[in-house]
Image (cartoon, helix red, strand yellow):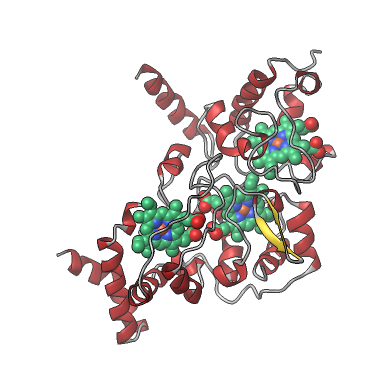
């Protein structure tokens, strides 16, 4: 119950700030809604869209070796501007008109939980 | 009383519709209620979804702009013999669509289709998109943008593509080409909260027209 109230308060503040873009401020929920369709509910890169003709495997977020090469800023870039903006596959969509920057920060926390890793420091 | 309200809301349509279609649409609205279609579909706009929870709480797609979205003939036929459109169960990522959607007899389907075709959105501009296979639209759909990652389509007799979005196989007979463009240009009008990214502002308007014209040939 308390958690609900806290979420509600968080939620309404973010709503006030995030002009036009849908906001929820819960990284796991945002991840499950927008990202899991390709990256999988457990982050393994095995969502329901990944059929045999899916040209490039979505990043497996549980792979710490790969994920620790990406800084939080790298993640923000690719999520907002899509694969081609960082010379990666166009199957990774651009989300800048869909998800607010504040929400990308929340989603990044979820990705870091999957890899149990941090990005490069310094 | 309810009937009266319903009647007055549709009053302007009286001028546009022949007596017969009018009777069909009114009958269709009645059937829609008695068959509990509105238990899973809402038919009054504008869009109600504000949060992810709102979207996930829905049991079926919104139908308040069905008359702008669908082709009348397809609608009539589908209501009598519903085929799977979304490969996954509505709002699920791991369960296949079980199928078995409610079915209507031919006379009921005609009336419900007539009713649904009266539900329109004035954001849809008529006569802008002519279905036309074109290299640019194809390139965008298959390579430049992630469309094919989430939507099934047919390519030389083979069904390819992802599963999280509605299948676009047969979109050329199902969807109104002008609605496809309106949805790409102004997605918030129809689906403010959805798993598909917003492309408006990231794609040129001309490119949206090209991809809409291409999808309309599917």
Above or below for A20 versus B66: above
Q: Residue at x 42, y 70 (%)?
A: B80
Residue B185 at least partly seen: no
Quadrant of the frame with the N terminus of chain A: top left
x%, y% of residue A17? 52, 32
In which quadrant of the rendered image does the C terminus of chain A lie? Answer: top right
Q: Residue furthest right?
A: A87
Which residue is drawn at the image coordinates 57% and 55% (left, top)?
B166
Q: Residue furthest top?
A: A122
Report the front residue among A37 and A84. Answer: A37
Q: Percent position (x, y) of residue A67? A: 76, 22
Counting every numbered tag in the picture gives: 0
Position in image of residue B182 (x %, y %) = 57, 63
Of residues A76 and B70, which is closer to you in this image?
B70
Q: In this image, A24 relative to B198: left or right?
A: left
> Is residue B15 shown left or right of residue B123?
left
State whether residue A101 appears in this view: yes
């Amino acid at each position: 119950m308390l958690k609900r109230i806290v979420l509600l308060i968080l939620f309404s503040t973010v709503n006030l700030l995030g002009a036009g873009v849908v906001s929820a401020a819960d990284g796991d929920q945002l991840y499950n809604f927008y990202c899991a369709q390709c990256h999988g509910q457990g982050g393994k890169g095995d969502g329901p869209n990944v059929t045999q003709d899916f040209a490039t495997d979505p990043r497996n977020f549980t792979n710490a070796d790969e994920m620790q090469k990406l800084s939080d800023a790298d993640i923000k870039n690719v999520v907002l501007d899509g694969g081609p903006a960082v010379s990666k596959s166009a199957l990774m969509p651009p989300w800048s008109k869909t998800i607010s920057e504040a929400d990308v920060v929340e989603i990044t926390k979820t990705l870091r939980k999957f890899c149990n890793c941090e990005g490069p420091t310094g | 009383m309810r009937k009266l309200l319903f009647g007055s809301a549709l009053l302007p349509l009286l001028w546009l519709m022949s007596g017969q279609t009018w009777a069909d649409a009114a009958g269709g609205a009645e059937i829609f209620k008695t068959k509990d279609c509105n238990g899973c579909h809402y038919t009054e706009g504008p869009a109600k979804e504000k949060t992810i929870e709102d979207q996930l709480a829905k049991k079926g797609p919104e139908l308040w702009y069905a008359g702008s979205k669908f082709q009348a003939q397809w609608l009539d036929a589908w209501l009598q013999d519903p085929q799977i459109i979304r490969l996954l169960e509505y709002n699920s990522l791991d369960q296949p669509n079980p199928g078995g959607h409610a079915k209507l007899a031919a006379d009921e389907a005609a009336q419900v289709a007539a009713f649904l075709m009266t539900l329109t959105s004035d954001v849809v501009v008529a006569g802008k998109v002519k279905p036309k296979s074109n290299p640019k639209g194809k390139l965008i759909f298959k390579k430049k943008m992630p469309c094919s990652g989430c939507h099934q389509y047919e390519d030389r007799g083979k069904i390819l593509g992802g599963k999280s979005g509605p299948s676009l196989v047969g979109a050329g007979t199902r969807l109104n080409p002008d609605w496809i463009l309106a949805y790409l240009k102004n997605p918030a009008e129809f689906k403010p909260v959805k798993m598909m990214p917003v492309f408006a502002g990231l794609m040129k308007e001309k490119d949206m027209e090209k991809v809409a014209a291409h999808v309309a040939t599917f």
